[in-house]
Amino acid sequence: MNNFSFANPVKIIFGKETIKEISKEIPAAAKVLVIYGGGSIKRNGVYNQVTDALKEHTFFEFSGIEANPHYETCMQAVALIKEKKCDFLLAVGGGSVVDATKFIAAAACFDGPDPWTMVAGKGKIEKAMPFGVVLTLSATGSEMNCGAVITKAETQDKLAFHSSLVYPKFSVLDPTTTFTLPPKQTSNGVIDTFVHVVEQYVTYPVNAMLQDMFAESILKVLVKEGPKALKQPKDYDVRANLMWASTWGLNEWIAQGVPQDWATHMIGHELTALYGLDHAQTLAIVLPGLLKVKKEQKGDKILQMGEQVFGINDNKPQAVLIENTIQAVEDFFEEMQVKTYLSDYGLGQEAVDAVANRISARGWMLGEHQDISGEVVREILKLRL
Ligand code: NZQ
Ligand code: ZN
Protein backbone atom coordinates (compact mmCIF):
# COMPACT_ATOMS: atom_id res chain seq x y z
CA MET A 1 0.00 0.00 0.00
CA ASN A 2 1.27 3.47 -0.83
CA ASN A 3 1.62 6.18 1.83
CA PHE A 4 -1.23 8.61 2.30
CA SER A 5 -2.46 11.51 4.41
CA PHE A 6 -6.12 12.38 4.17
CA ALA A 7 -9.08 14.03 5.91
CA ASN A 8 -12.62 14.33 4.63
CA PRO A 9 -14.49 16.97 6.60
CA VAL A 10 -18.00 16.61 5.10
CA LYS A 11 -20.82 16.01 7.59
CA ILE A 12 -23.33 13.52 6.16
CA ILE A 13 -26.96 13.63 7.25
CA PHE A 14 -28.56 10.49 5.83
CA GLY A 15 -32.12 9.19 5.74
CA LYS A 16 -35.82 9.88 5.44
CA GLU A 17 -37.18 13.33 6.32
CA THR A 18 -33.74 14.78 6.95
CA ILE A 19 -33.99 17.88 4.73
CA LYS A 20 -35.39 19.84 7.67
CA GLU A 21 -32.01 19.43 9.41
CA ILE A 22 -30.51 22.11 7.17
CA SER A 23 -32.07 24.81 9.39
CA LYS A 24 -29.67 23.78 12.18
CA GLU A 25 -26.63 23.44 9.93
CA ILE A 26 -26.81 26.88 8.30
CA PRO A 27 -25.89 29.80 10.60
CA ALA A 28 -29.06 31.66 11.69
CA ALA A 29 -27.75 35.03 10.53
CA ALA A 30 -26.60 33.80 7.13
CA LYS A 31 -27.83 35.28 3.87
CA VAL A 32 -28.32 32.15 1.82
CA LEU A 33 -28.38 31.64 -1.94
CA VAL A 34 -30.29 28.46 -2.85
CA ILE A 35 -28.93 27.12 -6.16
CA TYR A 36 -30.81 24.57 -8.26
CA GLY A 37 -31.33 23.21 -11.76
CA GLY A 38 -34.15 23.13 -14.27
CA GLY A 39 -37.04 22.61 -11.87
CA SER A 40 -37.22 18.90 -10.92
CA ILE A 41 -37.10 19.99 -7.27
CA LYS A 42 -40.32 21.97 -7.75
CA ARG A 43 -42.12 18.94 -9.19
CA ASN A 44 -41.06 16.41 -6.54
CA GLY A 45 -41.59 18.42 -3.36
CA VAL A 46 -37.91 18.92 -2.48
CA TYR A 47 -38.13 22.67 -3.11
CA ASN A 48 -41.01 22.98 -0.59
CA GLN A 49 -39.09 20.98 2.02
CA VAL A 50 -36.05 23.24 1.58
CA THR A 51 -37.96 26.52 1.72
CA ASP A 52 -39.96 25.29 4.76
CA ALA A 53 -36.70 24.48 6.53
CA LEU A 54 -35.33 27.93 5.67
CA LYS A 55 -38.36 29.91 6.82
CA GLU A 56 -36.41 31.53 9.68
CA HIS A 57 -33.47 32.34 7.35
CA THR A 58 -32.96 35.09 4.80
CA PHE A 59 -32.58 33.44 1.41
CA PHE A 60 -32.53 34.13 -2.33
CA GLU A 61 -32.70 31.73 -5.26
CA PHE A 62 -30.74 31.02 -8.43
CA SER A 63 -32.19 28.44 -10.83
CA GLY A 64 -31.25 27.17 -14.28
CA ILE A 65 -28.01 25.29 -13.65
CA GLU A 66 -27.86 22.94 -16.63
CA ALA A 67 -26.56 19.36 -16.77
CA ASN A 68 -22.78 19.59 -17.31
CA PRO A 69 -22.89 23.07 -15.76
CA HIS A 70 -21.67 26.04 -17.72
CA TYR A 71 -19.13 28.55 -16.51
CA GLU A 72 -21.25 31.27 -18.13
CA THR A 73 -24.32 30.33 -16.02
CA CYS A 74 -22.25 30.09 -12.85
CA MET A 75 -20.96 33.63 -13.38
CA GLN A 76 -24.58 34.91 -13.36
CA ALA A 77 -24.96 33.37 -9.90
CA VAL A 78 -21.73 35.07 -8.78
CA ALA A 79 -23.21 38.43 -9.85
CA LEU A 80 -26.36 37.74 -7.79
CA ILE A 81 -24.27 36.81 -4.73
CA LYS A 82 -22.45 40.13 -4.97
CA GLU A 83 -25.69 42.07 -5.47
CA LYS A 84 -27.51 40.42 -2.53
CA LYS A 85 -24.40 40.11 -0.36
CA CYS A 86 -25.00 36.38 0.25
CA ASP A 87 -22.57 34.59 2.57
CA PHE A 88 -23.76 30.95 2.41
CA LEU A 89 -24.74 28.75 -0.53
CA LEU A 90 -27.09 25.77 -0.63
CA ALA A 91 -26.94 23.41 -3.62
CA VAL A 92 -30.19 21.50 -4.16
CA GLY A 93 -29.96 18.93 -6.97
CA GLY A 94 -27.67 16.43 -8.66
CA GLY A 95 -23.96 16.51 -9.36
CA SER A 96 -24.26 19.36 -11.84
CA VAL A 97 -25.81 21.68 -9.26
CA VAL A 98 -23.29 20.63 -6.61
CA ASP A 99 -20.35 21.11 -8.99
CA ALA A 100 -21.67 24.48 -10.12
CA THR A 101 -22.02 25.55 -6.50
CA LYS A 102 -18.40 24.59 -5.80
CA PHE A 103 -17.23 26.73 -8.68
CA ILE A 104 -19.54 29.61 -7.70
CA ALA A 105 -18.27 29.39 -4.08
CA ALA A 106 -14.70 29.85 -5.30
CA ALA A 107 -15.44 32.33 -8.10
CA ALA A 108 -17.30 34.67 -5.73
CA CYS A 109 -14.06 35.03 -3.73
CA PHE A 110 -11.67 35.03 -6.70
CA ASP A 111 -9.37 38.00 -6.74
CA GLY A 112 -8.31 38.19 -10.37
CA PRO A 113 -9.56 39.06 -13.83
CA ASP A 114 -10.68 35.62 -15.03
CA PRO A 115 -12.17 32.96 -12.70
CA TRP A 116 -12.03 30.35 -15.50
CA THR A 117 -8.29 30.14 -14.83
CA MET A 118 -9.18 28.33 -11.57
CA VAL A 119 -10.53 25.47 -13.72
CA ALA A 120 -7.97 25.68 -16.51
CA GLY A 121 -5.21 25.26 -13.95
CA LYS A 122 -3.36 28.58 -13.67
CA GLY A 123 -5.45 30.55 -11.17
CA LYS A 124 -5.10 29.28 -7.61
CA ILE A 125 -8.16 28.89 -5.39
CA GLU A 126 -7.29 30.85 -2.24
CA LYS A 127 -10.73 31.17 -0.68
CA ALA A 128 -14.30 29.91 -1.13
CA MET A 129 -17.72 30.60 0.36
CA PRO A 130 -19.17 27.98 2.71
CA PHE A 131 -21.94 25.83 1.26
CA GLY A 132 -24.18 22.87 2.01
CA VAL A 133 -25.85 20.28 -0.23
CA VAL A 134 -29.28 18.66 -0.50
CA LEU A 135 -28.65 15.81 -2.95
CA THR A 136 -31.39 14.57 -5.33
CA LEU A 137 -29.43 12.24 -7.65
CA SER A 138 -26.96 9.60 -6.55
CA ALA A 139 -24.07 9.35 -9.00
CA THR A 140 -21.13 11.67 -8.75
CA GLY A 141 -20.02 11.60 -5.10
CA SER A 142 -19.66 15.37 -5.41
CA GLU A 143 -21.60 15.65 -2.14
CA MET A 144 -18.60 14.28 -0.26
CA ASN A 145 -15.59 15.28 -2.31
CA CYS A 146 -13.74 18.43 -3.28
CA GLY A 147 -13.82 18.12 -7.06
CA ALA A 148 -16.06 19.65 -9.71
CA VAL A 149 -16.37 19.58 -13.48
CA ILE A 150 -17.30 22.77 -15.33
CA THR A 151 -17.91 23.42 -19.03
CA LYS A 152 -16.99 26.64 -20.83
CA ALA A 153 -19.64 26.67 -23.55
CA GLU A 154 -17.77 29.24 -25.60
CA THR A 155 -14.78 26.95 -26.18
CA GLN A 156 -16.43 23.54 -25.57
CA ASP A 157 -13.97 22.81 -22.77
CA LYS A 158 -15.17 20.48 -20.00
CA LEU A 159 -12.53 20.48 -17.28
CA ALA A 160 -12.22 19.32 -13.67
CA PHE A 161 -10.74 21.17 -10.71
CA HIS A 162 -10.03 20.16 -7.11
CA SER A 163 -9.52 22.18 -3.95
CA SER A 164 -9.87 21.28 -0.29
CA LEU A 165 -11.60 24.67 0.06
CA VAL A 166 -14.69 23.36 -1.77
CA TYR A 167 -15.71 20.48 0.45
CA PRO A 168 -19.38 20.95 1.40
CA LYS A 169 -19.93 21.84 5.08
CA PHE A 170 -22.71 19.24 5.13
CA SER A 171 -24.65 17.06 2.70
CA VAL A 172 -28.19 15.86 3.25
CA LEU A 173 -28.80 12.48 1.59
CA ASP A 174 -32.49 11.59 1.70
CA PRO A 175 -32.94 8.57 -0.62
CA THR A 176 -36.66 9.36 -1.09
CA THR A 177 -35.64 12.40 -3.16
CA THR A 178 -34.38 9.98 -5.82
CA PHE A 179 -37.78 8.21 -6.23
CA THR A 180 -38.68 10.64 -9.03
CA LEU A 181 -35.56 10.16 -11.13
CA PRO A 182 -36.31 9.29 -14.76
CA PRO A 183 -35.00 5.76 -15.53
CA LYS A 184 -32.25 7.25 -17.68
CA GLN A 185 -30.85 9.23 -14.74
CA THR A 186 -31.06 6.22 -12.42
CA SER A 187 -29.06 4.23 -14.97
CA ASN A 188 -26.58 7.06 -15.48
CA GLY A 189 -25.99 7.29 -11.73
CA VAL A 190 -25.28 3.57 -11.36
CA ILE A 191 -22.85 3.57 -14.28
CA ASP A 192 -21.06 6.74 -13.19
CA THR A 193 -20.52 5.22 -9.74
CA PHE A 194 -19.38 1.90 -11.25
CA VAL A 195 -16.76 3.66 -13.36
CA HIS A 196 -15.59 5.85 -10.45
CA VAL A 197 -14.80 2.70 -8.52
CA VAL A 198 -13.11 1.01 -11.49
CA GLU A 199 -10.90 4.08 -12.05
CA GLN A 200 -9.59 3.66 -8.49
CA TYR A 201 -9.51 -0.15 -8.34
CA VAL A 202 -8.72 -1.67 -11.76
CA THR A 203 -5.12 -0.45 -12.02
CA TYR A 204 -2.33 -2.69 -10.63
CA PRO A 205 -2.11 -4.46 -7.27
CA VAL A 206 -0.39 -2.72 -4.34
CA ASN A 207 -1.79 -5.12 -1.73
CA ALA A 208 -4.25 -2.56 -0.35
CA MET A 209 -6.73 -5.12 0.89
CA LEU A 210 -9.21 -2.84 2.59
CA GLN A 211 -9.43 -0.41 -0.33
CA ASP A 212 -9.87 -3.35 -2.75
CA MET A 213 -12.58 -4.98 -0.64
CA PHE A 214 -14.41 -1.68 -0.19
CA ALA A 215 -14.27 -1.17 -3.96
CA GLU A 216 -15.58 -4.70 -4.59
CA SER A 217 -18.40 -4.14 -2.10
CA ILE A 218 -19.50 -0.96 -3.84
CA LEU A 219 -19.45 -2.69 -7.24
CA LYS A 220 -21.47 -5.62 -5.86
CA VAL A 221 -24.11 -3.26 -4.46
CA LEU A 222 -24.41 -1.60 -7.88
CA VAL A 223 -24.69 -4.90 -9.77
CA LYS A 224 -27.33 -6.15 -7.31
CA GLU A 225 -29.37 -3.01 -6.69
CA GLY A 226 -28.99 -1.11 -9.99
CA PRO A 227 -31.39 -3.27 -12.04
CA LYS A 228 -33.81 -3.34 -9.08
CA ALA A 229 -33.98 0.46 -9.02
CA LEU A 230 -35.21 0.42 -12.62
CA LYS A 231 -37.97 -2.06 -11.73
CA GLN A 232 -38.87 -0.67 -8.29
CA PRO A 233 -37.99 3.05 -8.39
CA LYS A 234 -39.75 3.78 -5.09
CA ASP A 235 -38.11 0.99 -3.06
CA TYR A 236 -36.48 2.87 -0.17
CA ASP A 237 -33.86 0.24 0.64
CA VAL A 238 -32.73 -0.03 -2.96
CA ARG A 239 -32.44 3.75 -3.26
CA ALA A 240 -30.67 4.03 0.10
CA ASN A 241 -28.11 1.40 -0.84
CA LEU A 242 -27.44 3.08 -4.19
CA MET A 243 -27.18 6.54 -2.64
CA TRP A 244 -24.64 5.50 -0.03
CA ALA A 245 -22.73 3.43 -2.60
CA SER A 246 -22.39 6.39 -4.95
CA THR A 247 -21.14 8.62 -2.14
CA TRP A 248 -18.52 6.01 -1.26
CA GLY A 249 -17.65 5.57 -4.91
CA LEU A 250 -16.02 8.99 -4.92
CA ASN A 251 -15.62 10.30 -1.38
CA GLU A 252 -11.90 9.76 -1.89
CA TRP A 253 -11.48 7.00 0.72
CA ILE A 254 -11.04 4.05 -1.67
CA ALA A 255 -8.43 6.14 -3.56
CA GLN A 256 -6.08 6.41 -0.58
CA GLY A 257 -2.85 4.47 -0.89
CA VAL A 258 -3.64 3.06 -4.35
CA PRO A 259 -2.83 4.05 -7.97
CA GLN A 260 -5.64 5.77 -9.89
CA ASP A 261 -6.50 5.81 -13.56
CA TRP A 262 -9.19 8.43 -14.57
CA ALA A 263 -8.47 8.12 -18.32
CA THR A 264 -12.04 6.94 -19.02
CA HIS A 265 -13.36 10.13 -17.42
CA MET A 266 -10.99 12.44 -19.24
CA ILE A 267 -11.85 10.86 -22.61
CA GLY A 268 -15.54 10.92 -21.71
CA HIS A 269 -15.46 14.63 -20.85
CA GLU A 270 -14.29 15.37 -24.40
CA LEU A 271 -17.20 13.36 -25.85
CA THR A 272 -19.66 15.32 -23.72
CA ALA A 273 -18.09 18.68 -24.56
CA LEU A 274 -18.10 17.98 -28.31
CA TYR A 275 -21.31 15.97 -28.81
CA GLY A 276 -23.48 16.57 -25.72
CA LEU A 277 -23.66 12.92 -24.60
CA ASP A 278 -24.58 12.34 -20.95
CA HIS A 279 -21.55 11.86 -18.70
CA ALA A 280 -22.43 8.21 -17.96
CA GLN A 281 -23.10 7.41 -21.62
CA THR A 282 -19.55 8.46 -22.45
CA LEU A 283 -18.15 6.26 -19.69
CA ALA A 284 -20.17 3.25 -20.87
CA ILE A 285 -18.66 3.67 -24.34
CA VAL A 286 -15.05 4.24 -23.27
CA LEU A 287 -14.46 1.85 -20.35
CA PRO A 288 -14.83 -1.50 -22.19
CA GLY A 289 -12.46 -0.24 -24.91
CA LEU A 290 -9.93 1.02 -22.41
CA LEU A 291 -9.96 -2.27 -20.48
CA LYS A 292 -9.35 -4.17 -23.73
CA VAL A 293 -6.45 -1.99 -24.86
CA LYS A 294 -4.91 -2.07 -21.35
CA LYS A 295 -5.68 -5.72 -20.55
CA GLU A 296 -2.01 -6.67 -20.11
CA GLN A 297 -1.19 -3.92 -17.59
CA LYS A 298 -4.53 -4.21 -15.80
CA GLY A 299 -4.80 -8.00 -16.10
CA ASP A 300 -4.37 -8.87 -12.42
CA LYS A 301 -7.04 -6.44 -11.28
CA ILE A 302 -9.44 -7.34 -14.12
CA LEU A 303 -9.18 -10.98 -13.02
CA GLN A 304 -9.75 -9.94 -9.40
CA MET A 305 -12.85 -7.92 -10.33
CA GLY A 306 -14.11 -10.81 -12.46
CA GLU A 307 -13.85 -13.25 -9.58
CA GLN A 308 -14.96 -11.02 -6.71
CA VAL A 309 -17.72 -9.01 -8.41
CA PHE A 310 -19.03 -11.16 -11.26
CA GLY A 311 -18.13 -14.64 -9.96
CA ILE A 312 -15.98 -15.41 -13.03
CA ASN A 313 -13.57 -18.02 -11.73
CA ASP A 314 -13.99 -21.10 -13.90
CA ASN A 315 -11.06 -23.21 -14.96
CA LYS A 316 -10.16 -21.36 -18.15
CA PRO A 317 -7.02 -19.61 -19.43
CA GLN A 318 -6.46 -16.17 -17.90
CA ALA A 319 -6.87 -14.46 -21.27
CA VAL A 320 -10.38 -15.91 -21.54
CA LEU A 321 -11.29 -14.89 -17.98
CA ILE A 322 -10.13 -11.33 -18.74
CA GLU A 323 -12.23 -11.18 -21.92
CA ASN A 324 -15.24 -12.59 -20.06
CA THR A 325 -14.89 -10.00 -17.29
CA ILE A 326 -14.73 -7.10 -19.76
CA GLN A 327 -17.82 -8.56 -21.46
CA ALA A 328 -19.58 -8.81 -18.08
CA VAL A 329 -18.94 -5.07 -17.50
CA GLU A 330 -20.35 -4.22 -20.92
CA ASP A 331 -23.34 -6.53 -20.38
CA PHE A 332 -24.05 -4.84 -17.03
CA PHE A 333 -24.10 -1.41 -18.70
CA GLU A 334 -26.49 -2.73 -21.36
CA GLU A 335 -28.63 -4.37 -18.64
CA MET A 336 -28.84 -0.88 -17.10
CA GLN A 337 -30.10 0.28 -20.50
CA VAL A 338 -27.11 2.44 -21.37
CA LYS A 339 -25.69 1.84 -24.84
CA THR A 340 -21.98 1.13 -25.13
CA TYR A 341 -20.96 1.95 -28.73
CA LEU A 342 -20.38 5.29 -30.45
CA SER A 343 -22.65 4.18 -33.30
CA ASP A 344 -25.54 3.81 -30.79
CA TYR A 345 -25.34 7.61 -30.45
CA GLY A 346 -24.93 8.35 -34.17
CA LEU A 347 -21.18 8.92 -33.87
CA GLY A 348 -18.44 7.48 -36.08
CA GLN A 349 -14.81 7.86 -37.08
CA GLU A 350 -15.05 11.67 -37.00
CA ALA A 351 -15.69 11.49 -33.22
CA VAL A 352 -12.77 9.09 -32.71
CA ASP A 353 -10.44 11.51 -34.48
CA ALA A 354 -11.83 14.65 -32.86
CA VAL A 355 -11.43 13.28 -29.32
CA ALA A 356 -8.00 11.74 -29.97
CA ASN A 357 -6.75 14.97 -31.54
CA ARG A 358 -8.02 17.02 -28.60
CA ILE A 359 -6.22 14.79 -26.07
CA SER A 360 -3.03 15.09 -28.16
CA ALA A 361 -3.41 18.88 -28.40
CA ARG A 362 -3.79 19.11 -24.62
CA GLY A 363 -0.54 17.17 -24.30
CA TRP A 364 -2.13 14.77 -21.83
CA MET A 365 -0.67 11.38 -20.96
CA LEU A 366 -3.46 9.62 -19.08
CA GLY A 367 -3.90 6.55 -16.90
CA GLU A 368 -2.13 5.11 -13.86
CA HIS A 369 1.07 4.76 -15.90
CA GLN A 370 0.60 8.07 -17.76
CA ASP A 371 1.02 6.24 -21.03
CA ILE A 372 -2.37 6.87 -22.69
CA SER A 373 -1.63 9.44 -25.37
CA GLY A 374 -4.00 10.79 -28.00
CA GLU A 375 -2.92 7.92 -30.25
CA VAL A 376 -3.83 5.32 -27.62
CA VAL A 377 -7.18 7.10 -27.21
CA ARG A 378 -7.72 6.63 -30.96
CA GLU A 379 -7.04 2.90 -30.55
CA ILE A 380 -9.49 2.69 -27.62
CA LEU A 381 -12.30 4.54 -29.39
CA LYS A 382 -11.85 2.60 -32.65
CA LEU A 383 -12.94 -0.50 -30.71
CA ARG A 384 -16.18 1.33 -29.86
CA LEU A 385 -17.32 2.31 -33.38
O1 NZQ B 1 -32.05 20.25 -13.59
P1 NZQ B 1 -33.14 19.49 -12.93
O2 NZQ B 1 -34.50 19.92 -13.33
O3 NZQ B 1 -32.97 19.39 -11.44
O4 NZQ B 1 -33.08 17.96 -13.52
C1 NZQ B 1 -31.96 17.10 -13.36
C2 NZQ B 1 -31.15 16.96 -14.65
O5 NZQ B 1 -31.94 17.16 -15.78
C3 NZQ B 1 -32.48 15.71 -13.14
N1 NZQ B 1 -32.74 15.39 -11.73
C4 NZQ B 1 -31.89 15.52 -10.67
N2 NZQ B 1 -32.48 15.04 -9.56
C5 NZQ B 1 -33.73 14.64 -9.90
C6 NZQ B 1 -33.90 14.87 -11.29
N3 NZQ B 1 -35.05 14.57 -11.94
C7 NZQ B 1 -36.05 14.03 -11.20
N4 NZQ B 1 -35.94 13.75 -9.87
C8 NZQ B 1 -34.79 14.04 -9.20
N5 NZQ B 1 -34.68 13.72 -7.90
O6 NZQ B 1 -31.44 14.86 -13.61
C9 NZQ B 1 -30.75 15.50 -14.67
C10 NZQ B 1 -29.27 15.27 -14.54
O7 NZQ B 1 -28.77 15.92 -13.38
P2 NZQ B 1 -27.20 16.11 -13.17
O8 NZQ B 1 -27.00 16.86 -11.89
O9 NZQ B 1 -26.58 16.66 -14.42
O10 NZQ B 1 -26.69 14.60 -13.05
P3 NZQ B 1 -25.46 13.98 -12.27
O11 NZQ B 1 -25.70 13.95 -10.81
O12 NZQ B 1 -25.23 12.70 -12.96
O13 NZQ B 1 -24.24 14.99 -12.52
C11 NZQ B 1 -23.49 14.96 -13.71
C12 NZQ B 1 -22.39 16.00 -13.67
O14 NZQ B 1 -21.46 15.72 -12.61
C13 NZQ B 1 -20.13 15.68 -13.15
C14 NZQ B 1 -20.36 15.23 -14.57
O15 NZQ B 1 -19.26 15.48 -15.39
C15 NZQ B 1 -21.59 16.01 -14.96
O16 NZQ B 1 -21.23 17.34 -15.31
N6 NZQ B 1 -19.27 14.84 -12.31
C16 NZQ B 1 -18.83 15.34 -11.13
C17 NZQ B 1 -17.96 14.67 -10.31
C18 NZQ B 1 -17.49 15.21 -9.04
N7 NZQ B 1 -17.79 16.45 -8.71
O17 NZQ B 1 -16.81 14.54 -8.29
C19 NZQ B 1 -17.46 13.35 -10.67
C20 NZQ B 1 -18.17 12.71 -11.80
O18 NZQ B 1 -17.26 11.89 -12.47
C21 NZQ B 1 -18.76 13.59 -12.79
O19 NZQ B 1 -17.78 13.89 -13.75
ZN1 ZN C 1 -18.09 10.35 -13.25
Image (tube, rainbow, N blue to C red):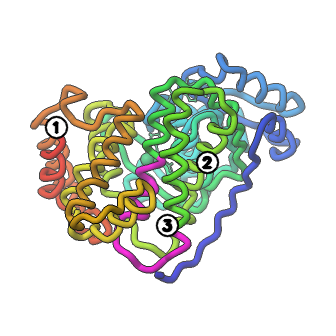
Q: Which mark is residue 317?
A: none
Q: Which is more N-terminal, label 2 or label 3?
A: 2
Residue 202 falls inside the magenta stretch: yes
* Horizontal side, residue 159 vs residue 255: left or right: left
Tell me what residue is drawn at x 51 percent, y 52 percent. Answer: 220
- Going by the numbered disc 3, the residue's amino acid type is Ala
The amino acid beneath tag 2 is Glu
Residue receiving disc 2: 143
Q: Quadrant of the C terminus?
A: top left
Q: Residue at x 55, y 32 (%)?
A: 229
Chief SS of the magenta region: helix
Q: Left or right: where does residue 191 sit relative to residue 269?
A: right
Please give the residue where the numbered disc 1 appears in the rendered image: 351
Could you tell me residue 139's position as x and y percent?
Answer: 52, 42
* Distance between mark 1 and mark 3 Cα atoms: 31 Å
Q: Position of residue 268 (x, y in %)?
A: 31, 45
- Nearer-the-camera pick, 200 or 147: 200
* Nearest-to-viewer mark from 1 and 3: 3
Instruction: Tell me, for residue 255, which label it has, or none.
Output: 3
SS of the residue under disc 2? helix
Of labels 2 and 1, earlier in sequence is 2
The crowd level at tag 1 (other Cα within 10 Å; few <14, some 14-19, many 20+) is: many
* Contact (Cβ within 8 Å) of mark 3 with mark 2: no
Q: CA distance from mark 3 to mark 2?
A: 16 Å
Q: Is residue 52 magenta?
A: no
Of the image marks 1 and 3, the number of the one nearer the N terminus: 3
Q: Are marks 1 and 3 in contact (CB under 8 Å)?
A: no
